[in-house]
Image: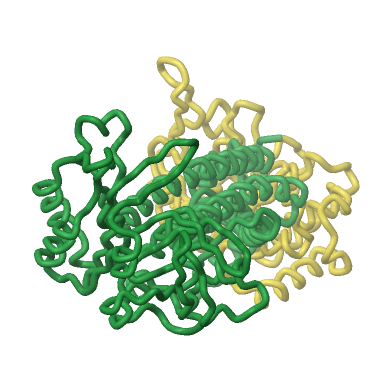
Chain colours: A green, B yellow
Amino acid sequence: MKAIYKAGDIVLLGLHGVMVHKVRSALTVLGILFGVWSVIAMLAINAGASYESQMALRELGSNNIIINSVKPPTEQKASEGRSGHHGALIYGLTDNDVRRLRANIPGLQDSVVVHRAAKTATANDRRINVAVISTEPNYPRVVQTDITAGRFISSYDMLRYQPHAVLTQGLADKLFPLADPLGKTVALDGDPFIVIGIVRQLPATLAGTSQSAILIPISTDRAQFGEFNIEFSQGSITSEKVEVSQLILQMANDDGVLEGAAIARNLLRRFRESQDYDVTVPLELIEQKRKQMQLWNYMFVSIASVSLLVGGIGIMNIMLASVTERTREIGIRRALGAKRRDIVTQFLVESVTLTAIGGTLGIAIGLLVPWVVQKMLGFLTIVTPSTLFLPFIMAVVVGLVSGLYPATRAAKLDPIVALRHE
Amino acid sequence: MKELVRLDNLWKVYPIGVDGVIALADINMSIHQGEYVAIMGPSGSGKSTMLNILGCLDRPTSGQYWLGGENAAVMSDSELSEVRNLRIGFVFQSFNLIPQLSLVENIEVPLFYQGVPRHHRHPRSRKLAQMVGLGDRLSHKPTELSGGQRQRVAVARALANDPLILLADEPTGNLDSRTSAEIMVLFDQLNRRGRTIILVTHEEDVAAHAHRVIRLRDGRIASDEFTDGRALA
């Protein structure tokens, strides 16, 4: 019981030491405050950036494997590109590749094929360059977009080569700013299509650069526009043949993704003559990004920790000065029965109190700053309990460590010498 | 009367130079309960060393120091702290009060390190303050008190733990003659009430209050006699 009273009293004594030297304590606290503050701010801003990039990747679907056809570099065209008639450039995934991939990847839940082309859409006397995305009925489910009006392309549309089209919300607003687009006609390079539905914007990373996209059945595309994409630009005509621009393989769960991707890469390597495709695995990217962000986190925290360290040195400095200044008092206390550990406790409590106050204020400001950054600069910041707790614990540990040396120095003073100290 | 202090073949040698400096050489003495002893001697005679050892601030190089039946010569630093805390009351020449503490808080420092709770410490230190005539200045800081008052506070503090021996080191060294006399009257009263007092001083006037005077010279006891003239057996 007495020991508890004594321990409590010595803690109070340490707190008293902080209170007596207000200016000195305040300045010391500042050092820790800035350290804690910067650690929290760094963690919060980095966590926000990390979250945003992860979300962008998650939009691609973490259980998806995306294979895009890639136009070979120009210098390779002559040698490696397969040339058809009229000197058309033929590259990319073929229906055969798609069939092979669909048949051989275990754990495949769904897959969708996309053929992309640039065309001019005309409606209402408006002409807009659009990305035509020719695809299959399951497209919205695979890329996770919502149909906001009407319906999507159906199997029936596919079978009957129906000239039906689905607009993205953005395109619908441009072509039909005032009217309901459903049932209206849009001409694609002159061929009429009937608008049957509207989808929310497509994920930017999947739709390509243009957000003005129009989706039509892939069967209709092939029947109507043929195999060749012909582009007129700068007085010359280029002609390309790409059977499949993009294949999205959706796995039943995330666990099968890496294995599926390996098999897909293997198959493609075996059957594609040239490297005219690109396999994107969002899960791999997410993982890479996570590791990269973690690295940034370590770097930021270690930079911020330096200021905490400087704060700690400040505390050590002040405590050493305090010990020297109070040598006589230490001598008196020792003569009257204070043990070495009582003196150690007194000075440790003082330094830990300083850092704890600094830590608490640092948390308060550390909470405020990410909020301001988010409001003013538009960065997403994320403050989690551990973002706050970690720097606080670090500060208290700094207080303990930097207080330990001055405290033991105080305790080791010979009471006889200390009593004579002026 | 009961024997409180006994020094047996006590030596203190400071390890300075090749042979060391002998501060105390083969001291043998004993002090009984209720005695009023003055330890005298010129500077360098070993007075201060003697006081430090008696006050358990220092350990002898060899020999035994029996304090209340325990050998303080073989105690650890922590045990010595405890003995100082429980058995010894110190009065210093320069008062040695803690400047940022009030009068009451200064008096209760020894109780603080005993772990006596605040609500028990306060009444006791108030009573002690009243006993030394400072009951009306309880919350004053040492700087707000005169030298004589400060030394009274120091005496009150020395009595807070109800010590076996009251050790005073030149208690009037920093006081004028009038306040010196007042402090000495206080010591005389305490001794009359049974308190064992050991004074270290070089002033004959002060030593004259004691009933027994031990004179040191070159680390040895030169004389040890009662002031009423009878020699110590």
Q: Residue furthest right?
A: B178
Query: Could you tell me if residue B208 is visible in this image?
Result: no
Q: Residue furthest top?
A: B18
A193 sits to left or right of B39: left
Residue B202's place in the image compared with B193, above or below, is above
Count of numbered circles on the image? 0
Which of the two residues, A29 or A347, is positioned nearer the viewer here? Answer: A29
A339 sits to left or right of A86: right
Residue A377's place in the image compared with B115, above or below, is above
Residue B213's place in the image compared with B187, above or below, is above
Image quarter of residue A103 = bottom left
- The x, y position of residue B43, in whole percent, is 65, 27
The quadrant in which the C terminus of chain A is found is top right
B185 sits to left or right of A210: right
Image point 64% across, 59% down: which residue? A374
Query: Could you tell me if residue A1 is visible in this image?
Result: yes
Which of the two residues, A136 or B104, is positioned nearer the viewer here? Answer: A136
Image point 73% across, 42% down: which residue? B93
- The x, y position of residue B85, in whole percent, is 55, 58
- The x, y position of residue A116, in whole percent, is 37, 57
Which of the two residues, B103 or A72, is positioned nearer the viewer here? Answer: A72
- The x, y position of residue B142, in whole percent, is 81, 53
B178 sits to left or right of A207: right
Which of the two residues, A170 or A38, is positioned nearer the viewer here? Answer: A170
Image point 49% across, 45% down: which residue? A300
Image point 28% across, 42% down: which residue? A88
